[in-house]
Amino acid sequence: MQFERVILVDDDPLIRRMLVSHLQKNNIPVLGVTNCTQAEEEFHKESADLMVIDLLLPDGDGLSLMQKIKKTAPATEVVIMTGFGTIESAVEAMKQGAANYLLKPFTLPQFDVALQQILERKALKGENIYLREQLEEESTGRELLYQSAEMERIEKLVKRVASTNATVLIEGESGTGKELVSRAIHQNSLRKEKPYIKVNCAAVPENLLESEFFGHEKGSFTGATNRREGRFELANGGTLLLDEVTEISLGLQAKLLRVLQEQEFERVGGNRTIRVDVRVLATTNRDLGKAVAGGEFRQDLYFRLNVVPIKLPSLRDRIGEVPFLVSKFLDRFARKHNKPTPKVSEECLRQLASYRWPGNVRELQNYTERAVILSEPGRDLSFDDFVSLGISTTPSANASPGATAAASGADGISISSLTAGGFPTVADMEKQLIKLALQHTRGHRNDAATMLGINVRTLRNKLHEYGDVFLTEAGLARE
């Protein structure tokens, strides 16, 4: 990032020439002028995103010039220079809108630092605007879509709980919309202008998760070359989502419980207690009650997280909404990809409604987007358009005879196929099932783990055990 144009205002020819030359050497377009009148005239001819102004000028003062410029171009940054500086004048300059203040004599490195600080602030401000706009877009463009009374009840519950500071536990299979619910809670809360931070507990290696949560001090472990703020600090004043919270080790669960109760912690390798104000939301695709009963999850932490439980139904349990969801997704992705909205045959909708959708709404959304992208003008989408994208035609339990017939070509495992090349070992079958699950979910490890009935950390360990050859065969890259 760099300034597009600079106007430098100083009646001292040595300083003016030195700074103009320095900026030109750094490929920054710059114009040097000697007084307020010239500066205003040149600015009105062609604006600048940075002005460097001496405080005392022959026909006025730098602060007055800055105010005139800011009135017409508030985004223009201003650095004030002076050889007669005081703390009071510096404070006044910053109050009136100066981005920085330099006391003469200063060195060129000091000048560079002042400008770099402005660029960093501009970049950070732009990033914050982008993230906020992205959050708004995701909250409106990826809102919860439903027709069922059950989902309507859930949305009403989300709106009621959002205005509180209660911890919410969101349960449901992968792809049911748990993160959408979490974002909706944040966006409808009093914290919506504050950070919304997410930690995918399943994706972070166990030995790094504590540092991810709480940050670390320089030198606290190998590779800790700098101090780093954790997600709890970054979320201060806002909302922190613990995605797949069941993947946290028992030892770290105890430390998490303390933060939830006391709102305080220490960084890894540090001894200073840091206090925060963070609302915590948690999601899981497992039954936390069973995890507690099995000794995998602390009961006291479960009670602390489960203040307000929200359980999202699978798409199998709201299968009547499939035609509605397909219609909404078709409109959305047609707009996104600048294509006409394709129509879908009634037979196609019936067959889609008979599919079990192990990846839930996310899977339906992904396949619908691909169908839109590959659609041909003037032709209705058929079930074949979805089957060609990778949908297994294995029907649900309530599938119609026609759908069952369509499933006759589905992949399956039989005794004859097993014995054709020698009876396989359990390890062989395990590899085959994992490969099939990963291919079916297009490499999405969380969804594959759900299909296999294991947690994603177990799946990750298995993939590491099988090695790079297996990953290549499955079409995956090592994490």
Image (cartoon, rainbow, N blue to C red):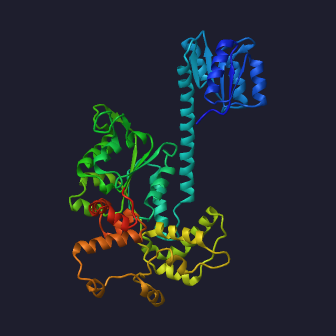
Of 93 and 190, nearer the camera is 93
Q: Position of residue 439 (x, y in %)?
A: 40, 70
Of 327 and 112, nearer the camera is 112
Of 349 and 145, nearer the camera is 349
Q: Residue furthest top?
A: 84
Of 258 and 390, nearer the camera is 390
Can you see residue 112? Answer: yes
User: What residue sits 29% from the left and 50% below the top?
Assistant: 206
How many labels were placed on the picture?
0
Can you see residue 54? Answer: no
User: What residue sits 69% from the left and 13% below the top?
Assistant: 13
In this view, 468 is above or below 198 = below
Using residue 226 as the reference point, say whether residue 289 is left or right of it: left
Q: Position of residue 40 (x, y in %)?
A: 76, 23
Using residue 38 as the reference point, say whether residue 256 is left or right of it: left
User: What residue sits 55% from the left and 84% below the top?
Assistant: 347
Q: Quadrant of the C terminus?
A: bottom left
Q: Quadrant for residue 231, please give it.
A: top left
Q: Position of residue 441 (x, y in %)?
A: 41, 68
Q: Position of residue 425 (x, y in %)?
A: 22, 76
Q: Quadrant of the N terminus?
A: top right
